Image: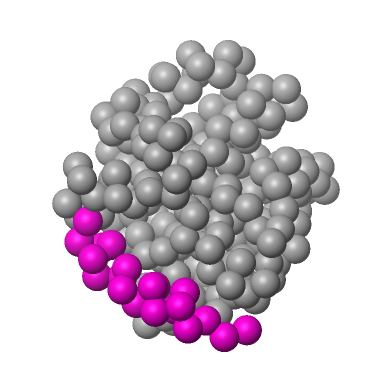
Amino acid sequence: MKNLPLGHLKVSSGTIDDAIKFIYDCISSQSKAYCIPLNLTKYVLSKSDEKLKQVIREANMIISDGVPIVWLSKRAGYNDVQRITGIDLAEKIFQTAQKKGWSLFFLGASEENLKKAVENLTERFSGIRIVGYHHGYFKDHEVDSVIDCINRSSVDVLLLALGLPQKEYFVADHLEKIDIRFCLTVGGAVDIWAGTKKRTPASIQRLGLEWLYRSIYDMSRARLIARYGISFLKELIFYKK
């Protein structure tokens, strides 16, 4: 995959299979990398959040987590940037982990939802190696013990399910100390895997209207869209290469 400049950030070209190949190479070579799924909210928020901007720009892979980023990429002249959501990449990782024996660790969400998500994923992806998980409601003074827990598990792939921008800050502040091969920030995907939230229907995803669907039943997301949508629309209309 190739990282291309996109406004004040970057975006990765390539397919979801290219992304899996990149992860495979990371694990095989015992190197370390991380991926940030980029959406409309994160794009706008990172304009005024220097730490968020930096961690996105330094990511090894920045996937287009939503049609608006694909639209902006096309405005920049990139026709090979495809929509790859964080949850789609995660589930492709699970499928590959079944075959390759990759080990997984989940960090984030509530204890109850996390436990249910792990149970559901273990049932869906038979033989998958989930070597540990930890809820996301830990205090600053507990971070070292959380990192020790991850490191003791000898994990390959860390799925980071904290909120925005906590998960990105966690990567910026602590990834260097964590002994993993690949980290993917997945946000609220754990709640979907747990069954407490529903994913946007495929037909609406294809239309690029996930943001509208989610805002109908999630007022916090609706407020974010209202807050950042106009700014992104201006960027889309007046984008300069």
Q: Nearer the viewer, residue 125 or 207?
A: 207
Vertical side of 25 occupied by 225: above or below: below
Q: Nearer the viewer, residue 141 or 200?
A: 200
Vertical side of 39 occupied by 207: above or below: above
Vertical side of 13 occupied by 106: above or below: above
Q: In the image, is 47 to the left or to the right of 10?
A: left
Percent across and percent down for residue 198 are 31, 32
Reply yes or no: does residue 229 show up in magenta: yes
User: At 63% across and 53% down in the image, what residue appears?
Assistant: 82
Q: Nearer the viewer, residue 56 or 26?
A: 56
Q: Quarter holding the C terminus?
A: bottom right
Percent across and percent down for residue 23 are 71, 45
Q: Quarter holding the N terminus?
A: bottom right
Percent across and percent down for residue 49 are 39, 79
In which quadrant of the rendered view does residue 102 lie?
Answer: top right
Q: Nearer the viewer, residue 120 or 18?
A: 18
In which quadrant of the rendered view does residue 75 lie?
Answer: bottom right
Reply yes or no: does residue 226 show up in magenta: yes
Percent across and percent down for residue 124 are 51, 16
Magenta span dominant secondary structure: helix
Q: Which residues are magenta?
A: 222-241
- Viewer can see residue 95: yes
User: At 52% across and 46% down in the image, what residue appears?
Assistant: 85
Vertical side of 181 occupied by 101: above or below: above
